[in-house]
C-alpha cells in the first residue's frame, strides 16, 4: 500500500494501523457533517481524511504509539479542514469578516426589530465608509452554478444553461 503524496510503501505495522484506524475516518467525517456546508462532498472529505490517516501512520513515532488515537483524530480532522479551506473561494480573514458582519447584522436586527440600514451596520463595526466598502467586496456572496443545469429546474427537457449562451464565434 502506498500513499500518493509520499509514494512510500507502508511496512507491516503501518499497514495494520492503517487498516485498524480506517473506519475512524468515516466516523470523523460523519461527526463533522452537521458543521459542514451543504455542498461539501462526503467522498472528497473522506479521501482527504484517508490521506491524513496515511500521513499519521507514516509519521508514527513507536515511542508514542499509546497516544496514537488522539494523533490520528487530529491528523484526520486537520486534513479534512485543509481540504475544505482549499475549496473555499474566500480567504480565512474574509470568512472571519463575513461571520462578524453577519453577527452584527443579526444583533442589530434583533435590537431594532427591523433589518438594519447599511450606515447602522457600518457604525456598529466602527469603520469608515471606505473600509466598509472594502469589507463588503471581500465578503460578497457568490453563487456558483453548473452550466449543465437546466434553466427551468422542474423541466428536464429544457435546454441547459450552456446551450442558452450565444456563441459569438458561430
Image (cartoon, grey):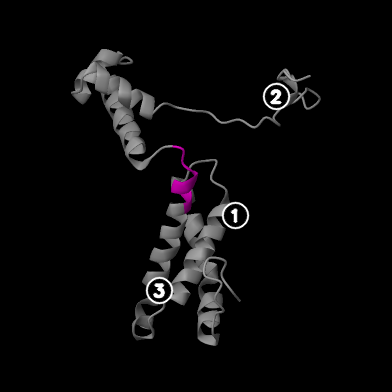
**x then y, percent, for residue 27:** 50, 62
Residue at the left extreme, as displayed: 126
> Label 2: which residue?
161
The first of marks 1 and 2 along the sequence is: 1
Q: Residue at x 79, y 19 (%)?
A: 170
Q: Quadrant of residue 10?
A: bottom right
The first of marks 2 and 3 along the sequence is: 3
> Label 3: which residue?
69
Looking at the image, which is closer to me, 20 or 11? 11
Q: In the rendered structure, which segment of residues is drawn in magenta?
A: 83-89
Q: CA distance from mark 1 to mark 2?
A: 27 Å
Q: Is residue 81 visible?
A: yes
In this view, the mark in front (1 or 3): 1
Looking at the image, which is closer to me, 135 or 110? 135
Q: Residue at x 54, y 62 (%)?
A: 26
The first of marks 1 and 3 along the sequence is: 1
Please tell me how crowded label 2 is: few (under 14), some (14-19), or many (20+) other residues with Cα within 10 Å.
Answer: some
Q: CA distance from mark 1 to mark 3?
A: 23 Å
- At numbered mark 1, what does the secondary structure look like: helix, strand or loop? helix
Amino acid at each position: 500500500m502506498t500513499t500518493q503524496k509520499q509514494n512510500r510503501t507502508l511496512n507491516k505495522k503501518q499497514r495494520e494501523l492503517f487498516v485498524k484506524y480506517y473506519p475512524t475516518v468515516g466516523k470523523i467525517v460523519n461527526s463533522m457533517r452537521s458543521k459542514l456546508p451543504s455542498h461539501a462532498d462526503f467522498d472528497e472529505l473522506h479521501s482527504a481524511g484517508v490521506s491524513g490517516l496515511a500521513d499519521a501512520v507514516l509519521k508514527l513515532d513507536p515511542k508514542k504509539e499509546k497516544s496514537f488515537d488522539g494523533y490520528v483524530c487530529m491528523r484526520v480532522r486537520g486534513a479534512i479542514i485543509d481540504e475544505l479551506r482549499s475549496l473555499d473561494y474566500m480567504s480565512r480573514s474574509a470568512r472571519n469578516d463575513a461571520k462578524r458582519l453577519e453577527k452584527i447584522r443579526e444583533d442589530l436586527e434583533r435590537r431594532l426589530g427591523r433589518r438594519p440600514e447599511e450606515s447602522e451596520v457600518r457604525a456598529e463595526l466602527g469603520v469608515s465608509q471606505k473600509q466598509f466598502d472594502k469589507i463588503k467586496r471581500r465578503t460578497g456572496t457568490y453563487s456558483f452554478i453548473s452550466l449543465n443545469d437546466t434553466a427551468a429546474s422542474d423541466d428536464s427537457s429544457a435546454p441547459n444553461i450552456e446551450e442558452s449562451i450565444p456563441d459569438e464565434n458561430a
